[in-house]
Amino acid sequence: MRLYDRVAEAQWGQGGGQARLDALSADLGGPPVRLHDLALFLALEQGAPVALDAQQLAGLTRQLRFVMSPSAGMRLAAARAYGRAGESATAGALLQAALLQSLYPTRRDYADPGDPAPDAAAFLTVLAAFPDQGAARRIRGDLARLAQRQAASPAVMAPFAALASAAD
């Protein structure tokens, strides 16, 4: 997702971010979009001045159902979009899935070169974007408990230790 974040930053910087976000939004209600377009949509959403509206969220939900195995980075980006829009339950579910995927990655999970494995900082950054910080704190606590329950060893837990300290 890091490459898409850079492309989105450039599009916002050149004044074309909103037009591109709107064009991609229009496609969300139709047949499956390319994974590239969905990733760019999520990256552009991060720079948008306002959260996604109900129609855009419905389209995003529809398109995510077509993605067979989203990366942890894509799940984090989608969680940020839902969280910014006030859909904390959906965001929390995506964050939990991303955490489990991050605790036990497969080769396929990090097929995109240059994308580091998500760590606690990535999760905390997503949660910081939520307007409802009470929900963000609850989700952070849920993530900390999940990580502590699921981590097979201290080495697996190490990148996520900050989740536990942030939840206290």
Image: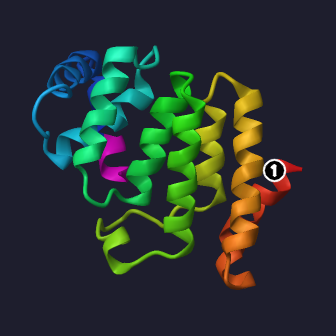
Q: Can you give x and y, in whole percent of width and height, for residue 43 in the image? A: 35, 37
Residue visible at 19% across and 46% down? 36
Q: Residues within 10 Å of mark 1 (few under 14, many from 20)?
A: few
Residue 110 higher or lower than 132, as above or below? below
**Residue 39 shows in this picture:** no
- Total labels drawn: 1
Q: Where does the image place residue 64, in percent across and percent down from the top left?
A: 30, 43
Side of 139 where 76 appears, left or right: left
Instruction: Please tell me which residue lies in front, 21 or 108.
Output: 108
Q: Residue furthest left?
A: 31
Secondary structure mainly formed by the magenta segment:
helix
Q: Magenta stretch: residue 29 in it?
A: no
Image quarter of residue 24? top left
Q: Which residue shows up at 49% across the image and 40% down it?
A: 79
| SS class, disc 1 | helix
> How are the residues colored?
rainbow
Residue at 46 percent across and 18 percent down: it is: 51
Pointer 1: what residue?
166
Q: In the rendering, at what x and y percent does residue 58 appear? A: 33, 25
4 in magenta: yes
**In the image: residue 138, left or right of residue 86:** right
Amino acid, disc 1? Ala
Q: Which residue lies furthest to the right in this view?
A: 168
Above or below residue 117? Residue 51 is above
Percent position of residue 162, x then y? 76, 59
Residue 84: tell me if it is visible: yes
Task: Judge whether 51 appears above or below 114 on screen.
Answer: above
Q: Which residue is drawn at 33% across and 30% down?
A: 44
Left or right placement of residue 97 versus residue 26 in this view: right
**Which residues lie in the magenta part?**
1-6
